[in-house]
């Protein structure tokens, strides 16, 4: 007997699709939220041990403040109905979309979908804010940072997202076809511009205004700063890569209606671009005769991920290889330019997110196919042959995407510079944006967060000069009970193989680690900070090089902190 179609059967099928889409959104939101763990590890691994708690505290603050401010203001500015510039409703989720309606299954499914949509949108907003944290690490005033981050989450980011992803945004490809910018709207599939250019540009502005860390630049030289752990950096990068599948695959916002192919293709393109970005960075560094550092490959991977976000589900996989390779070159070049202009970005947020995001916004304007555009954004069946595509894809309306994306980039740049710049200037005149020099030198953890992070260990930061005259600095953690013996051993190795080792405090006194450790082992109660009056500790050593940076060094105590 031929199957019959009933209204009940259609309703159940629709409900199943909605439930699947709700789960898909929640799954993506959880993955994107988990990226916060990756950011935390990456940033902790890139700073001095003395500022570990401060970095973790700021990351937690990002999450908590972002949740509240996005709930009250951000979601309404993003998805609220209003005008083409900004939403003016749905603040604090006060809207009929979040009510049960008539209590029917369809109404409840729609309510569930809107709740899931909020969580997914919040995870994106929190990511944009966290980009700033690593860039200005180790010297930015916490109160100023809290205000700055809250402004990004509640207003600066939601407005840009409304332009691109709101149904009535002036640059949105989701708007009615006749009202789309240049007939196509701006295509930013997963947020290369909306999330990463916003966060990266906000980070650049903050870095410029707050200035570099003490000792980062010496005359015309760039000084290496202590970094806690390449293990944390690499683990953080891998966690971010994992979370990026939620970023790009779930950017379709649904898996039903034929969009599953976009989500699956996004996973393939995301993987390829990340891998090629990391590998190309390694080859470029090798060609430029740089030391091959895990940190650089990690950043190449992240730049590849940022760059593919704008087009991940809308292009063929071979274009992802090209995007990842160009992203790597963009990262290497822009990272070098920051140092030339003496801009101190601790984790290279600006090269990765700003420069990678700009390339990620241009890429869909070059490589998106007409069919993928129609699948994602829709187009009238009778006019589908006139649907836009990327500049290199050979369709009739191939230049409209490039024009729309460039106009979006210009408008976004003006918006972020005007808003972020104004807030930073206001904060500098009121609460101040930079911490006290004493806090920066001695470490923020001790001054603001209740003590060292690693109470079982002592931290030794010293500078030495090799036989060739090249200067290096080193930060080490050793168990408190083994500090003296470790210092003796290290001094012997450095003096015998690399040159003379010396340490100097902020007061200007210096001595070799061997001499200082000998004083400790003989029980002489002195430290670098408080030398004995008889001169046994802290006397100058003419053989060794002294600190050019006022970093705290091993203080000789056997109890306490990190």
Image (cartoon, rainbow, N blue to C red):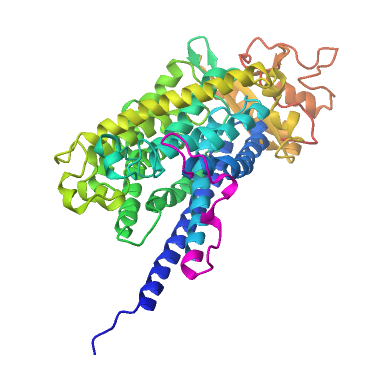
Q: Where does residue 330 sit, x and y in percent of width and height?
A: 34, 29
Q: Residue at x 44, y 39 (%)?
A: 161
Residue toward you, 38 or 170 = 170
Question: Residue 537 colored magenta?
Answer: no
Answer above or below: position of 36 versus 55: below
Q: Where does residue 97 sit, x and y in percent of width and height?
A: 51, 55
Q: Can you name the residue that lies furthest to the bottom here?
A: 1
- Can I make out residue 284 in this image? no
Residue 215: image quadrant is top right
Residue toward you, 258 or 315 = 258
- Position of the C terminus by quadrant: top right
Q: Where does residue 74 sit, x and y in percent of width and height?
A: 54, 40
Answer above or below: position of 18 versus 240: below
Count of picture labels: 0
Residue toward you, 122 or 279 = 122
Residue toward you, 355 or 364 = 364
Q: Where does residue 157 sit, x and y in percent of width and height?
A: 49, 35
Q: Residue at x 25, y 38 (%)?
A: 183
Q: Main secondary structure of the magenta part?
A: loop
Where are the magenta residues, as a range? Answer: 80-108
- Position of the N terminus by quadrant: bottom left
Relative horizontal placement of residue 492, taking residue 445 as reference (left or right): left
Relative horizontal placement of residue 357, taking residue 402 as reference (left or right): right
Residue 130: image quadrant is top right
């Amino acid at each position: 007997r031929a199957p019959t179609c009933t209204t009940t059967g259609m309703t159940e099928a629709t409900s199943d699709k909605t439930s699947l889409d709700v789960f898909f959104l929640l799954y993506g939101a959880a993955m994107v939220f988990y990226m916060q763990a990756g950011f935390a590890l990456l940033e902790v691994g890139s700073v001095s041990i003395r500022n570990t708690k401060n970095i973790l505290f700021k990351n937690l603050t990002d999450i908590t403040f972002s949740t509240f401010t996005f709930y009250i203001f951000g979601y309404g500015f993003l998805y609220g109905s209003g005008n083409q510039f900004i939403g003016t409703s749905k603040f604090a989720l006060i809207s009929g979309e979040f009510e049960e309606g008539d209590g029917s299954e369809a109404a409840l499914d729609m309510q569930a979908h809107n709740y899931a949509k909020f969580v997914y949108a919040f995870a994106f907003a929190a990511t944009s804010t966290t980009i700033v944290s690593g860039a200005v690490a180790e010297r930015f005033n916490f109160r100023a940072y809290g205000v700055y981050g809250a402004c990004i989450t509640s207003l600066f980011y939601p407005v840009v997202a409304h332009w691109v992803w709101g149904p009535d945004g002036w640059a949105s490809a989701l708007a009615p076809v006749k009202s789309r910018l240049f007939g196509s709207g701006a295509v930013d599939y997963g947020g290369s511009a909306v999330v990463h250019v916003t966060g990266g540009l906000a980070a650049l502005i903050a870095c410029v205004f707050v200035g570099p860390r003490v000792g980062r630049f010496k005359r015309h030289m760039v000084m290496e700063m202590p970094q806690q752990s390449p293990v944390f950096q690499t683990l953080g990068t891998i966690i971010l890569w994992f979370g990026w599948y939620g970023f790009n695959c779930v950017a379709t916002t649904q898996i039903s209606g034929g969009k599953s192919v976009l989500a699956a293709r996004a996973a393939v393109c995301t993987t390829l671009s990340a891998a090629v970005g990391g590998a190309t960075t390694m080859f470029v560094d090798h060609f430029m005769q740089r030391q091959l550092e895990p940190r650089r490959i990690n950043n190449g991977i992240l730049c590849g991920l940022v760059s593919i976000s704008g087009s991940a589900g809308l292009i063929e996989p071979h274009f992802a290889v090209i995007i990842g390779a160009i992203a790597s070159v963009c990262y290497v070049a822009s990272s070098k330019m920051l140092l030339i202009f003496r801009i101190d970005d601790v984790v290279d947020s600006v090269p990765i997110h700003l420069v990678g995001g700009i390339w990620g916004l241009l890429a869909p304007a070059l490589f998106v196919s007409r069919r993928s555009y129609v699948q994602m954004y829709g187009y009238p069946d009778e006019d589908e042959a006139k649907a836009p595509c990327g500049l290199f894809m050979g369709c009739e309306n191939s230049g409209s995407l490039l024009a729309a994306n460039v106009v979006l980039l210009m408008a976004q740049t003006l918006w972020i510079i005007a808003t972020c710049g104004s807030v930073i200037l206001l904060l500098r005149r009121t609460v101040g944006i930079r911490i006290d020099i004493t806090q920066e030198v001695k470490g923020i953890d001790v001054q603001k967060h209740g003590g060292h992070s690693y109470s079982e260990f002592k931290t030794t930061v010293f500078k030495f000069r090799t036989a060739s005259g090249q200067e290096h600095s080193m930060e080490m953690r050793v168990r408190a009970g083994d500090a003296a013996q470790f210092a003796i051993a290290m001094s012997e190795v450095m003096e015998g193989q690399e040159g003379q080792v010396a340490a100097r405090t902020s007061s200007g006194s210096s001595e070799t680690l061997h001499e200082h450790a000998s004083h400790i082992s003989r029980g002489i109660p002195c430290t670098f900070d408080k030398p004995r009056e008889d001169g046994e500790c802290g006397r100058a050593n003419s053989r060794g090089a002294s600190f050019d940076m006022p970093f705290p060094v091993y203080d000789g105590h056997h109890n306490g902190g990190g």
